[in-house]
Image (cartoon, grey):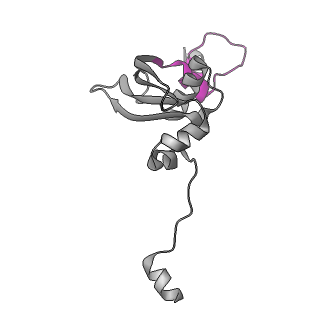
């Protein structure tokens, strides 16, 4: 029984071990509710319900990868996920998701703080007040 547990719970003894990220990908399911096409903002918007009984929570990167497969999105940066709350007792989470048609639409309509969180178009920090005065 210990050998079976060491190989990720599979009963095969061929030496192929499941990777941690690959195993985590299959341990959660995604359901979308309140799905809307929003042509004015160039996006699809929806509420996500995630069921993850064996995980504490699921990373947004894993969710974006699975959503890209479900909705055939080529650019992962066009997917924005936010506002996730884990239900009391764990095992379920819900949050909000947006899939933009293009990166240009996303840069136009998405708030700057969410773009910064996603690592898109991060601006250089300006000089502080004291530093400006010191250079004078």
Quarter of the figure that contains the N terminus: top right
- Please provide percent x and percent y for residue 7: 61, 20
Is 8 displayed left or right of 40 in the figure? right
- Please provide percent x and percent y for residue 29: 47, 17
Span of residues in magenta: 5-30
Nearer to the camera, 17 or 74: 74
Nearer to the camera, 60 or 47: 47
Image mark count: 0
Which residue is depicted at the point 56% across and 63% down? 124
Residue sticking out furthest to the front: 40
Which residue is depicted at the point 60% across and 40% down? 104
Which residue is depicted at the point 43% across and 20% down? 36
Residue sticking out furthest to the top: 11
Residue sticking out furthest to the left: 88
Check if residue 130 falls in the magenta segment: no
- Please provide percent x and percent y for residue 45: 45, 26
Which residue is depicted at the point 45% across and 49% down? 113
């Amino acid at each position: 029984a210990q050998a079976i547990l060491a190989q990720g719970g599979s009963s095969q003894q061929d030496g192929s071990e499941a990777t941690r990220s690959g195993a985590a990908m299959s341990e959660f399911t995604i359901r979308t509710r309140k799905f809307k096409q929003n042509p004015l903002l160039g996006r699809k918007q929806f509420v996500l319900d995630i069921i993850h009984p064996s995980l504490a929570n699921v990373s947004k990167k894993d969710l974006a990868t699975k959503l890209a497969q479900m909705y055939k999105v080529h650019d992962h940066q066009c997917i924005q996920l936010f506002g996730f709350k884990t239900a009391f007792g764990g095992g379920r989470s819900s949050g909000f998701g947006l899939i933009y048609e293009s990166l240009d639409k996303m840069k136009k309509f998405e708030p700057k703080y969410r773009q910064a969180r996603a690592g898109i178009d991060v601006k250089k920090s300006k000089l502080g007040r004291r530093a400006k005065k010191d250079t004078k």
